[in-house]
Amino acid sequence: SGQKIEAGKTLLFFDEIQACPKAITSLKYFCENMPELHVIAAGSLLGVVIRQQEISFPVGKVERLQMFPMSFEEFVMASENGETLLQAVKSTEAFEPLRTVFAEPLEKLLRYYYIVGGMPEAVATFFETHDFEAVSQVLSNILQDYSDDFSKHAPIHDVPKLHLIWDSVPKQLAKDNNKFVFSHVKAGKRAADLEDALQWLFSAGLLHKLECVTNAELPLSNNAEGSIFKVYMSDVGLLRVKSGLDPQTILNETPLYATFKGALTENFVLNELLKQNFHPYFWRSENTAELDFLLEVRNELIPIEVKAEKHTKAKSYNQFCKKFKPKKGLKLSMKNAGTASIEDTETLMLPRYESFRVKEFIL
């Protein structure tokens, strides 16, 4: 290219590196033979490509960073008064109520985020045009691109299964008990028929898996029930469009979408937790009590209850705290911040628009 590469001055960037397996392998030699040169590699569907092509990934030679759609905090940052709003949030203690002058615009932006999501092109389109139809078109195009990628990158025999699972996720989330059921993907289908295709979607980062624990003992990973799990989408805007949910339904808080609003809210919170490097589970007791999220942080259990509205009563949360005696817990709702002691568990009531502060409170 005629450009001189100088270590310490040049940043070498391999984009779409999954298209060249040898480039992935070469990262090992950049690390070993030219460690003074700064190298970044980026690629879509890397998890899938590395696994399928059996590429020799340079273990221990590369610092890996998983990219996600923009978080709600980043969405606020992109808005007109975002810097002021975030400064107000971060200068207020997590347990202190936020002033109405800041809380109301954040609530409004959260509703917009449910509509737009965090895909960068959709976010840019929204703040440039404030046109929900244009945003929905962008998201529809992205969904179509993902579907097209199934045929390009997935094993040919899995492509029909991928489409079936991909289309079933919003329908499964819309149910009161939104546990993923293979037979709901297509009548007569079992786990053995579909689990490879489902794993492909997890590896691609298009879907996220939330596993169930019934015995909440450390480590949670050893107590996860492999056959009981929920499946969520990587972005709430994509979920909204794939569900056919009209933006006005969210803006007007239409009562008839109460069940799906709960699922959309759970999807939002899960994505926010993943972006803070948490690995959440959900807890279910023998008598069907269910806690939305459970974290393992520094050898402690952190229960999290999520409410779509302002009410914060949660029987399952109370039951969990009574049984397992965690030191800290969280309730996320549309109610302003506050604290409470529930069954001797220090509980922070946090508004959902401050979900990006969960790590700050826990750590």
Image (spheres, helix red, strand yellow):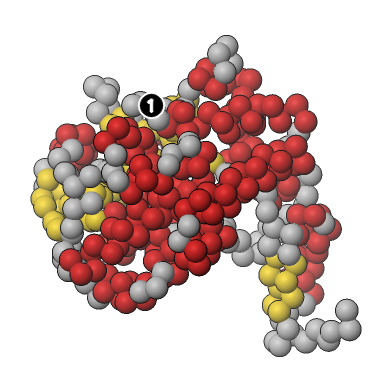
As drawn, which residue projects farthest toward the right? Answer: 2
Image x and y of residue 104, in percent: 24, 62
> Which residue shows up at 71% across the image and 41% down it?
148
- Residue at image mark 1: 175
Q: Is residue 220 left or right of residue 349?
A: right
Q: Quadrant of residue 298?
A: bottom left
Q: Is residue 12 visible?
A: yes
Q: Nearer the viewer, residue 103 or 193?
A: 103
Q: Above or below — where is 220 with respect to 78?
A: above
Q: Amino acid at mark 1?
A: Lys
Q: Position of residue 201 (x, y in %)?
A: 61, 39
**At 17% across and 68% down in the image, what residue appears?**
99
Nearest the eye: 320 or 28: 320
Q: Is any atom of residue 35 visible in this view?
A: no
Q: Is residue 2 left or right of residue 85?
A: right
Q: Quadrant of residue 203?
A: top right
Rendering coords of residue 143 (x, y %): 60, 44
Q: Residue at x 57, y 60 (%)?
A: 121
Depicted 37 relative to depicted 131: above or below: below
Crowdedness near tag 1: few (<14), some (14–19) or many (≥20) residues, C-alpha within 10 Å? few
For the residue pair 141 and 194, the one nearer the viewer reads as 141
Q: Position of residue 259 (x, y in %)?
A: 32, 32
Q: Mark 1 falls on what kind of element?
A: loop
215 to 15, vertically: above or below: above
